[in-house]
Image (cartoon, rainbow, N blue to C red):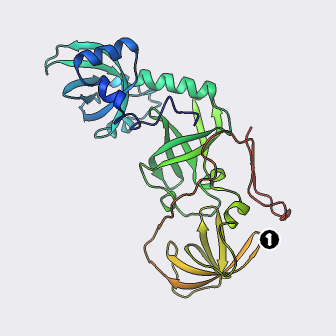
């Protein structure tokens, strides 16, 4: 993955090297001298939106203007700081042990780490690069992803999967680790956008997991007058005849009547209704987890009339 050095927050928390660096005041001082990136859990955000971090019994203090890149200009919203309480945060040590009105403390900076991470991403990432990330926030229009050190990128709902969904919660949950590809890099605005569907396989790759005559499970993703769309995988749906009581988000068992590659069609028949719980998700199967993509074409060569592709440039 392209972001292994600047990993999403939480990746270092239980690493042995991180634990050793926070073992004692002497170890913390060594980390300061070496400029080491560390992680610990934020335990308090005070009225001034300064963060307190637990450094194995030593109080770490992150002043408000050091809590996040862009916080001093308003580019980063205050909720991004408030919401870190109880969660891991990355930082570098800025001082040795200091005396304060509330007792000894160590001065930390999360902003310094994030600025280094963002500078690296903006300089090194290219459209088509594959990254790992962690879902931090979900909205009806898309999801926000930590690609490293709390640097947030965005995946719009239409780029989540080929199979249509009504809400990103149909596919993701907060805190979920995912893979994504860089869609664009805006160096002027300091923004990186992502796409996800290209890593979930082409029509042929997904269709190869099934064969006519099988009965498999699926999820109802759309109900129309002419039939019901059943998701077999996040990048593959088929059409079944209407069913009077089937509901969107419902798990069903379906019989595969036929597969027609020339039309990218799966003809299905609903056998049974398995669940009425909405927004039921299936485990994601990634066909690509690393490297770089220049071009991705979902549709097979034998289906020239319907071309679905992504050009990374």
Say which quarter of the image contains residue 71.
top left
Which x, y percent locates residue 32?
Answer: 34, 15
Which residue is nearer to you in this view: 300 or 126? 300
Disc 1 marks which residue? Answer: 263
The answer to whether one can see residue 187 in this image is no
Say which quarter of the image contains residue 107.
top left
Residue 18 vs 162, above or below: the answer is above
Which x, y percent locates residue 98?
Answer: 21, 13
Which x, y percent locates residue 27?
Answer: 28, 18
Point 44% across, 29% down: residue: 74
Q: Quadrant of the N terminus?
A: top right
Point 32% across, 39% down: residue: 87
Which residue is nearer to you in this view: 107 or 7? 7
Point 63% across, 51% down: residue: 199
The answer to whether one can see residue 134 in this image is yes
Binning the other alpha carbons within 10 Å of mark 1 as few (below 14), some (14 to 19) or many (20 upward) gives: some
Q: Quadrant of the C terminus?
A: top right
């Amino acid at each position: 993955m392209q972001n292994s050095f600047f990993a999403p927050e939480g990746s270092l928390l239980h690493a042995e090297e991180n634990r050793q660096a926070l073992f004692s005041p002497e170890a913390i001082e060594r980390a300061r001298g070496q400029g080491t990136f560390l992680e610990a859990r934020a335990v308090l955000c005070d009225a001034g939106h300064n963060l307190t971090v637990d450094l194995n019994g030593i109080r770490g203090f992150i002043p408000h203007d050091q809590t996040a890149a862009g916080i001093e200009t308003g580019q980063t919203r205050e909720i991004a700081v408030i919401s870190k309480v109880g969660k891991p945060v990355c930082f570098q040590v800025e001082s040795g042990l200091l005396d304060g009105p509330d007792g000894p403390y160590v001065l930390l900076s999360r902003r310094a780490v994030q600025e280094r991470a963002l500078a690296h991403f903006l300089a090194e990432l290219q459209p088509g690069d594959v990254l790992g990330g962690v879902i931090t926030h979900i909205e009806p229009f898309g999801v926000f992803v930590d690609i490293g050190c709390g640097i947030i990128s965005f995946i719009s709902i239409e780029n989540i999967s080929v199979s249509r969904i009504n809400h990103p919660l149909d596919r993701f949950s907060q805190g979920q680790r995912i893979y994504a590809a860089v869609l664009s890099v805006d160096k002027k605005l300091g923004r990186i956008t992502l796409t996800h569907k290209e890593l979930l396989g082409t029509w042929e790759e997904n269709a190869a997991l099934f064969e006519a005559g099988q009965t498999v499970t699926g999820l109802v993703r759309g109900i129309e007058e002419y039939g019901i769309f059943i998701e077999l995988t996040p990048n593959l749906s088929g059409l079944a005849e209407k069913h009077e009581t089937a509901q969107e988000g419902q798990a069903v068992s379906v019989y595969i009547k036929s597969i027609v590659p020339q039309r990218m069609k799966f003809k299905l028949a609903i056998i049974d209704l398995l669940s009425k719980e909405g927004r039921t998700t299936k485990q994601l199967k990634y066909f690509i987890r690393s490297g770089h993509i220049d071009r991705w074409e979902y549709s097979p060569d034998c289906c020239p009339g319907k071309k679905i592709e992504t050009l990374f440039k």
